[in-house]
Image (spheres, rainbow, N blue to C red):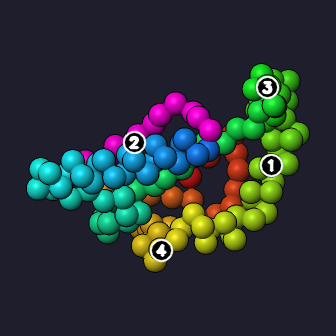
Amino acid sequence: EDANGQFEMNWEFDDALATADKHSFFKFMVKSVAEKHGLKATFMPKPFKGLTGNGCHCHISVWDADGSQNAFADPSAELGLSQQGKCFLGGIMDHATALAAITNPTVNSYKRINAPRTTSGATWSPNTVTWTGNNRT
C-alpha cells in the first residue's frame, strides 16, 4: 500500500465464508513465513507512529438469487448506484458509529484514526462518516 514493506492483498470475490477463510489463512501464512525467516509480520492498524497504518477493507455487493443481477448497480443512475444500493449505503452510514466497535476492535485501531500526517502525507483512514463517488478514506 503506502508504507515501507506494506502490501495490498486482493483476491477474487467469493461468498462471505470462503472470503473470511482466505483472509484468516492469509494472515496466518504471512506470519508463519515471516517467523520462519526470523522476521515479524504485523497487521496492527498503527504499528509505527510516523508511518501509514494497516487497513482492512472489503467490497460488498448483493446479487439476485441466480447471480445475474447486481442489486446495487443501475447504469442509468448517478454514479451507477441503484436505489437499493443507496439505501444500503444509508444504513451503513446511519450505523457507522456502532459499526466502529466491530471494525475497530482494539485501542490500536483508534491510533490510526485521526493520526497525524505520515511520511507519505496520508493516513488512508476514515475519521468522518461521508460518502462520495471516489472517497479514498
Q: Position of residue 35 (x, y in %)?
A: 18, 55
Disc 4, SS: loop
Alpha carbon of mark 1 to alpha carbon of mark 2: how far?
26 Å
Is 68 on the left-hand or right-hand side of 126? right
Labels 4 & 2 near each other (Cβ < 8 A): no
Alpha carbon of mark 1 to alpha carbon of mark 4: how far?
26 Å
Q: Which mark is residue 79?
A: none
Residue found at x 12% / y 50%: 37
Q: Is residue 135 magenta?
A: no
Disc 1, SS: helix
Disc 3, SS: loop
Which residue type does callout 3 highlight?
Asp
Disc 2, SS: loop
Q: Which residues are magenta?
A: 3-15
Mark 1 highlights which residue?
Answer: 88
Q: Between tags 2 and 3, which lies in front?
A: 3
* In-front residue for pair 45/124: 45
Which residue type does callout 2 highlight?
Glu
Q: Which mark is residue 106?
A: 4
Can you say whether 127 is above or below 107 in the image? above
The rendered magenta stretch, by its main secondary structure, is classed as: loop
Q: Which mark is residue 8?
A: 2
Labels 4 & 3 near each other (Cβ < 8 A): no
